[in-house]
């Protein structure tokens, strides 16, 4: 079937029909006919926000929080930003580089107060609590922290604060230097183990309380003649909440540091 487009155009101009295209007039039989697909106006392009290293890191943290370390990849970060992985490589060398930058970024969340040497014990404990909070707030960050050292401004800010807090009470520089490494390692290991939960020694799925009860009963049943101290301390071995044990570790660190202090507390 051939359409005489001259007749169609003439028909539009008769009787005031040139008021607009047929699709705009009620009851027009041509209104139901779709337009040619290549005449459809193109969708307005959305302005793309230029990628920066900061935006890449922010996107990586969002992916990490949702999907964990196993789900974090350059491709997934690119998808999060609405671009391809190739664009990410302009700002990040590889996944290991990205994990390093993510670790440093979340470390920046630590709120370091003005160092007050007269309250150094409590300020140090509060730092430990904040470090654990960061590990809990971001999925798998505790795992990422193991084996990695926060570098650049992050390391400088943290180290300067530690020295300003502890030097005035006479704690030696080497002890302060080692302390930063110890605290990072302990918090990372504690947070990572916490994220794993209590693993059943039988290989079967069991509630944490059931696992502790089972081990407690076993320890209590040990022959008292061979293990007198262990069997007598069975209740102590399995006492205390995770929070109480964490606070014990902080107190242990502070008491150990006090043996090095030579200045005013």
Image (spheres, rainbow, N blue to C red):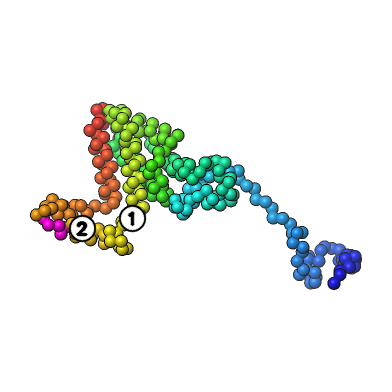
Secondary element at image label 1: loop
Q: Which residue is mark 1?
A: 197
- Tell me if residue 165 comes above or below residue 128 in the rendering: above
Main secondary structure type of the part rendered in magenta: loop
Instruction: Report the residue that reaches farthest toward the left.
Output: 225
Question: Residue 246, image x and y in percent?
Answer: 29, 47
Which region is colored magenta?
220-224
Residue 255 seen from this side: yes
Question: Residue 178 vs residue 14: left or right?
Answer: left
Residue 137 seen from this side: no
Question: Residue 161 vs residue 37: left or right?
Answer: left
Q: Residues within 10 Å of mark 1 (few under 14, many from 20)?
A: few
Q: Which mark is residue 216?
A: 2
Tell me which corner region of the image, top left, top right, bottom left or bottom right, holds residue 224: bottom left
Question: Residue 262, image x and y in percent?
Answer: 24, 28
Mark 1 and mark 2 lie on one chain; the one further toward the N terminus is 1
The CA distance from mark 1 to mark 2 is 18 Å
- Tell me if residue 230 comes above or below residue 31 in the rendering: above
Secondary element at image label 2: helix
Residue 222 drawn in magenta:
yes
Which residue occupies 59% across, 49% down?
83
- Tell me if residue 7 comes above or below residue 228 in the rendering: below
Q: How many marks?
A: 2
Tell me which corner region of the image, top left, top right, bottom left or bottom right, holds residue 201: bottom left
């Amino acid at each position: 079937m051939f359409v005489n487009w001259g007749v169609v155009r003439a028909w539009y101009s008769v009787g005031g029909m040139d008021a607009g295209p047929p699709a705009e007039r009620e009851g027009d039989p041509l209104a139901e006919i779709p337009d040619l697909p290549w005449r459809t106006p193109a969708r307005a392009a959305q302005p793309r926000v230029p990628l920066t290293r900061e935006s890449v890191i922010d996107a990586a943290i969002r992916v990490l929080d949702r999907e964990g370390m196993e789900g974090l990849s350059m491709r997934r970060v690119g998808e999060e930003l609405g671009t391809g992985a190739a664009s990410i490589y302009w700002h990040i060398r590889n996944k290991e580089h990205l994990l390093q930058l993510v670790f440093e970024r979340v470390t920046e969340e630590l709120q370091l107060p003005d160092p007050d040497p007269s309250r150094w014990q409590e300020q140090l404990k509060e730092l430990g609590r904040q470090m654990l909070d960061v590990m809990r707030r971001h999925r798998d960050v505790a795992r990422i922290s193991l084996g990695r050292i926060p570098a650049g401004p992050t390391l400088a800010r943290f180290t300067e604060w530690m020295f300003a807090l502890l030097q005035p009470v006479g704690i030696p520089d080497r002890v302060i230097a080692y302390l930063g490494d110890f605290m990072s390692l302990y918090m990372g290991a504690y947070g990572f183990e916490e994220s794993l939960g209590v693993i059943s020694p039988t290989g079967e799925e069991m509630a944490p309380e059931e696992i502790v009860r089972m081990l407690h009963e076993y320890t209590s049943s040990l022959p008292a003649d061979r293990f007198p101290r262990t069997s007598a301390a069975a209740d102590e071995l399995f006492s205390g909440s995770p929070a109480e044990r964490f606070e014990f570790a902080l107190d242990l660190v502070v008491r150990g540091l006090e043996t090095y202090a030579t200045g005013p507390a």
